[in-house]
Image (cartoon, rainbow, N blue to C red):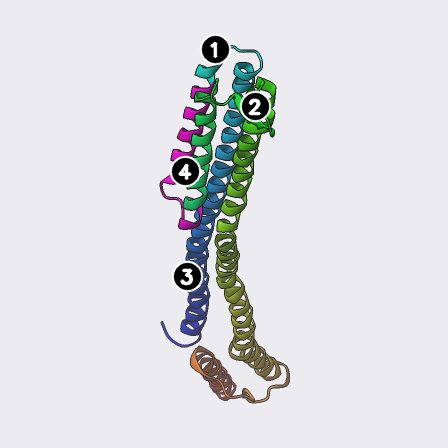
């Protein structure tokens, strides 16, 4: 294969190769983008679920403690232990693999959980007594369950809830750099397509130019020269510089016209 056919083939194969490479790069980047997006969404969903479960378990612990302190239900202590065990399990589930910034928050949550457990386990006479004093006597007064719940336990429970909210804030803050990287990856996945599109437009325009210059224009000149030869009996002559197959075609047409003229003259001479 040579000449115009080779040029056209190379041009189209170049476009196909460019589109194939850019498509593979885009697919690779989109695959990474999809993986990063799933990772971020999964981590966010996991953190939200863990925080929701911890708050639910803290609420169950609060309700069970209320039953113990206000209503004196002894079986409520078992419910308190169960709720604390659930909280510790939720904390342990996210501790492994958590970044350093979250490890401290999780440690604090564990301390607050242990404090809630200590308060409920030790609730009784020792926690139900407060010291009152005046200038004449020092006396012990029994603190009611409601006073203990509102004055002691609720403060510890509120601290735990605030720490859970802080955990959510910190976990979302840890995702901000990954979200920024996700935005960069999105641009990286789209960039090859845009670049290949621009290059393809340029190649198509160049291909149009070369096809017109080396294909359409020579064909029109050859056709014009042949039409003039047939219509006006003028010698066949293409007024342009031809190359490759079009030059061979023009030479063959000129040869045929010359042969045709020679044959016609021989016929006239014979007559």
Q: Which residue is mark 3?
A: 21
- Using the numbered discs, state the Cα–Cα distance from disc 4 to disc 2 in whole angstroms: 32 Å
Q: Is tag 1's residue or tag 4's residue first in the polypeptide sequence?
A: 1
Residue at image coords 60%, 86%: 233
- Res 62 quadrant in image: top right
Q: Which residue is mark 4?
A: 94
> Compared to 226, does 76 lie above or below?
above
Q: What is the x, y in percent for residue 250? A: 48, 82
Please provide the residue range marked out in magenta: 80-102
Q: Which residue is mark 2?
A: 148
Q: Which mark is residue 74?
A: 1
Mark 4, other Cα within 10 Å: few <14 / some 14–19 / many ≥20: some
Lower sequence index among marks 4 and 2: 4
Q: Name the secondary structure under disc 3.
A: helix
Q: Earlier in the sequence, mark 1 or mark 3?
A: 3
Q: Magenta segment: does it hold 9?
A: no
Q: Calculate the distance from the C-alpha at mark 2 to the C-alpha at mark 3.
A: 71 Å
Label the magenta part by its dominant secondary structure.
helix
Q: CA distance from mark 4 to mark 3?
A: 41 Å
Observer-side mark, 4 or 2, equals 2
> Is there CB contact under 8 Å for labels 2 and 3?
no
């Amino acid at each position: 294969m040579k000449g115009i056919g080779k040029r056209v083939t190379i041009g189209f194969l170049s476009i196909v190769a460019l589109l194939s490479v850019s498509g593979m790069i885009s697919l690779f980047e989109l695959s990474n983008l999809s993986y990063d997006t799933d990772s971020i969404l999964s981590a966010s969903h996991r953190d939200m679920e863990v925080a929701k479960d911890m708050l639910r378990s803290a609420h169950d612990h609060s309700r069970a403690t209320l039953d113990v302190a206000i209503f004196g239900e002894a079986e409520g202590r078992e419910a308190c232990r169960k709720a604390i065990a659930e909280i510790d399990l939720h904390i342990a589930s996210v501790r492994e693999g958590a970044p350093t910034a979250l490890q401290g928050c999780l440690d604090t949550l564990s301390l607050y959980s242990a404090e809630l457990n200590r308060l409920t386990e030790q609730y009784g006479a020792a926690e139900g007594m407060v010291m009152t004093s005046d200038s004449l006597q020092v006396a012990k007064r029994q603190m009611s369950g409601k006073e203990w719940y509102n004055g002691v336990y609720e403060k510890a429970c509120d601290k735990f809830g605030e720490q859970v909210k802080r955990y959510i804030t910190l976990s979302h803050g840890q995702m901000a750099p990954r979200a920024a990287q996700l935005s960069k990856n999105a641009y990286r996945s789209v960039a090859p397509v845009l670049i290949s599109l621009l290059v393809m437009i340029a190649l198509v325009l160049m291909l149009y130019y070369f096809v017109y210059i080396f294909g359409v224009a020579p064909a029109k000149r050859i056709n014009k020269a042949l039409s003039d030869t047939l219509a006006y009996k003028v010698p066949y002559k293409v007024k342009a510089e031809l190359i490759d197959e079009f030059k061979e075609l023009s030479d063959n047409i000129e040869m045929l016209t010359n042969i045709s003229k020679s044959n016609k003259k021989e016929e006239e001479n014979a007559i």
